[in-house]
């Protein structure tokens, strides 16, 4: 498949595996999983096409289970989902990329998950910058993840290396 076709399928998968499974008759099982066969039928794609999307995806957004019979989005859901990820010890510092118009609210009330199941944090400023640039001029926030852990906040890391946490109170974040 060419780049355009791969992106088109990836976007449809993001939509249905993260936000709107019912639109194509799917239901997410606990963990966010759907049977591969059901997804193939719903999207009218072949297993070979699906494998190519999963393998080439620039953010490795999707992952198969160990048996290869189920697939899920690794993060980014807006539907209520418990990914069942174990708590993990984050790097001492994590980053979040946002845009100027959200800054006042974030500094006042901290980071909230908004429409997603968790706040998404990045291990590097480069990744945070890419996340922010989707919306405008990047503003990078430095998160004191070590202090958050010490204060009892839990973190999980997705299969594609996005750090997830419920909220980041304002005292743990600083503008770079
Ligand atoms: C902001 C993409 C006001 C937050 C990316 C962000 C990522 C607040 C927006 C993944 C706020 C939410 C997630 C508060 C947070 N007041 N605004 N208290 N707290 N915000 O898209 O982190 O390509 O839900 O700064 O690459 O931007 O889809 O989160 O700007 O990994 O795979 O509210 O989505 O991945 O936006 O992005 P999002 P995000 P995919």
Image (tube, rainbow, N blue to C red):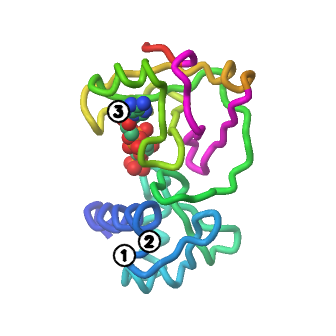
Q: CA distance from mark 3 to mark 2?
A: 26 Å
Question: For the residue carrying disc 3, how many other residues have a C-alpha within 10 Å: few (<14), some (14-19), or many (20+)?
Answer: some
Q: State if disc 1 and disc 3 touch (CB < 8 Å).
A: no
Residue beneath disc 2: 21
Residue 25 in the image: state x and y as whole percent. 43, 81
Question: Going 36% across and 75% down the picture, which residue do you hit?
Answer: 23
Q: CB of mark 3 within 8 Å of CB of mark 2?
A: no
Distance from Cα at disc 2 to Cα at disc 1: 5 Å
Residue 35 seen anywhere in this rendered image of the structure:
yes
Q: How many marks?
A: 3
Apparent side of residue 137 relative to residue 114 in the rendered image (left or right): left
Q: Are marks 2 and 1 in contact (CB under 8 Å)?
A: yes
Comes first in the chain, label 3 or label 2: 2
Segment tinted magenta in the rendering: 152-172
The label number, if any, that marks residue 23 in the structure image: 1
Q: Is the C-beta of the residue carrying label 3 under 8 Å from the nearest atom of ligand 1?
A: yes
Residue pointed to by mark 3: 132
Density class for disc 2 (Cα within 10 Å; few <14, some 14-19, many ≥20) is: some
Q: Position of residue 24 (x, y in %)?
A: 38, 79
Q: Is residue 100 left or right of residue 129?
A: left
């Amino acid at each position: 498949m060419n780049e355009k076709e791969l992106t088109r399928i990836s976007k449809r998968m993001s939509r249905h595996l993260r936000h709107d499974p019912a639109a194509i008759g799917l239901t997410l099982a606990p963990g966010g999983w759907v049977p591969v066969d059901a997804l193939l039928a719903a999207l009218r794609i072949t297993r070979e096409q699906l494998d190519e999307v999963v393998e080439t995806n620039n953010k490795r957004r999707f992952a198969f289970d160990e048996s290869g019979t189920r697939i899920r989005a690794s993060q980014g859901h807006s539907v209520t989902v418990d990914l069942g990820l174990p708590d993990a010890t984050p790097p001492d510092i994590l980053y979040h990329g946002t845009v100027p118009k959200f800054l006042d609210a974030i500094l006042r009330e901290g980071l909230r998950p908004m429409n997603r199941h968790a706040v998404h944090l990045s291990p590097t400023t480069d990744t945070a910058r890419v996340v922010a640039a989707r919306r405008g001029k990047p503003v990078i926030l430095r998160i004191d993840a070590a202090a958050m852990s010490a204060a009892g906040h839990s973190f999980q890391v997705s299969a594609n290396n996005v750090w997830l946490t419920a909220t980041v109170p304002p005292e743990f974040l600083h503008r770079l």
